[in-house]
Amino acid sequence: MFEVIIGLEVHVQLNTKSKLFCSCATSFGEEPNTNVCPTCLGLPGALPVLNKEAVHKAIMLGTALKSVINKTSIFNRKNYFYPDLPSGYQISQFEVPVVGLGELLIDFEDGSSKKIGVTRAHLENDAGKNIHAGDVSHVDLNRAGTPLLEIVSEPDLRSAEEAILYLKKLHSIVRYLGISDANMQEGSFRCDVNVSIRPKGDNKLYTRCEIKNMNSFKFIEKAIKYEVNRQIEAWEDGVYEKEVVQETRLFDVNSGETRSMRGKEDAADYRYFPDPDLLPLILTDEMLEKYSKIPELPDEKKERFVKEFGIKEYDASVITSSLEMANYFDEMMKESINSKNAVTWLTVELQGRLKEGITLENSPVDSKTLAKLISRIDDNTISGKAAKEVLDYLMENSEEVDAVIEKLGLKQVSDDGALLEIIDGILAANEDKVAEYKGGKEKMFAFFVGQVMKISKGSANPQKVSALLKERLA
């Protein structure tokens, strides 16, 4: 039996308007090599100037992760050659990062949780982007110099499932703080995954392999599972030391396999030394006080939803896993609707109708409209089944809830006189079944209810129908 050891290095692109050490724009999707200047091109004589907004965002994340925030930190040069790294080195933090030891709590479906250590979070500038087209490669340096916050976990994760829970929680925290759009498709939230194995009960750390630049939860999970199986098979076949070497690997999404990319460097290979152009970063008490005041985080919001609205912890976890969903739910509950119905109609009914490209933010049904629909179920104006028809209509048409109910003729009949007329007609036409019911065949009651609903075309209030039927049959 083997134990899996996983550590994650997450790169979060901070949503500052300008780059980390120059005033070039960080906007995505511009023409290649247009958002560049002598500083981010690494030209001789160009000097870096630190972006203070990036520092403020680092303090916010450090606060959220309950981390040690170092009042003095140092920028280093990390030396390596890549075509998209024009200076031949990256400006990063090595010995003393701005954010030190912290923690992140992951939650499991059974209600249990686990604390994952965070080693550090340091500021660094991003490289550019290599674009390969057949035999030709191009380099776009628009991204070079973009501010990154690299968050390094302790090797506390023991499965692909735990790794995904950690990443989703961190992604959620970053979005709640508003320090990054964390758009995985655009590379604003990506991670390197370090994987190793060891026999159960062994405390030694064996050779780790790094899977580079992953930006999809689904593929990260698949890559980890493949890599774990690859290493276990190598161990059991007696070729572990030959086949599992310290290296950087890539995940092939088509084959579902990891493959070797290059040998993995150690810290000494990067020849770190303090950047001579940058003074130590010194945080003032005023900065720490101002930027440690952060918004309500997922765990706090979850606790509030359970306490304030009486919903289940698991439901609260699902809702607060997404900032958009949490805000949508908060807005719905301002309309004083049934919280249980609100959870179901948000997480099941509405979410199930959001087609590709449509999110809660651009949903044709906003929080007030959905709350109004739920209130019409609560006050028995319409049935749950009818409400689904209304929601389907609202997804395609921008109209008021009550107007749609009238237009579709879905208003429930609750008038005693109208319902009794239907009921009396059914009982008179089915005297044999009435006799069966009175003779002890209680299942016939469902038949009578069904007949009323059929004749009323589903518009009868089921609760009223049941009560009046019992009176008549008594």
Image (tube, rainbow, N blue to C red):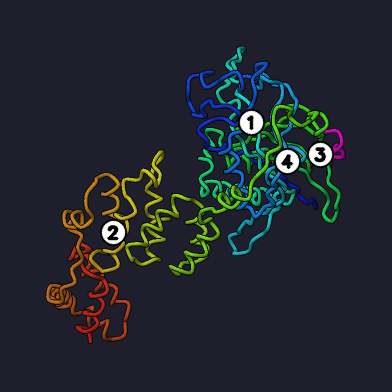
At which x and y percent is residue 46?
64, 20
- Disc assigned to residue 125: 1
Look at label 1 and name its amino acid.
Answer: Asn
**Callout 3: helix, strand or loop?**
helix
Looking at this view, is 5 or 73 the one in front?
A: 73
How much space separates mark 4 and mark 2, taking CA atoms?
A: 48 Å
Look at label 3 and name its amino acid.
Answer: Ala
Q: Which residue is mark 3?
A: 234
Q: Which residue is mark 2?
A: 373
Q: Which residue is mark 4?
A: 194
Q: Nearer the viewer, mark 1 or mark 3?
A: 1
198 to 459, vertically: above or below: above
Q: Are marks 4 and 2 in contact (CB under 8 Å)?
A: no
How much space separates mark 1 and mark 3, taking CA atoms?
A: 37 Å
At which x and y percent is residue 204?
86, 49
Range covered by the magenta-colored residues: 235-244
Q: Earlier in the sequence, mark 1 or mark 3?
A: 1
Q: Earlier in the sequence, mark 1 or mark 2?
A: 1
Instruction: Examine the rendering and report whether any part of residue 225 can be seen.
Output: no
Q: Which residue is pictured at 19% across the width and 83% down the height?
A: 472
Q: Are marks 1 and 2 in contact (CB under 8 Å)?
A: no
How much space separates mark 2 and mark 3, taking CA atoms?
A: 58 Å
Q: Nearer the viewer, mark 1 or mark 4?
A: 1
Q: Which residue is pictured at 48% across the width and 69% down the height?
A: 307
**Callout 1: helix, strand or loop?**
strand
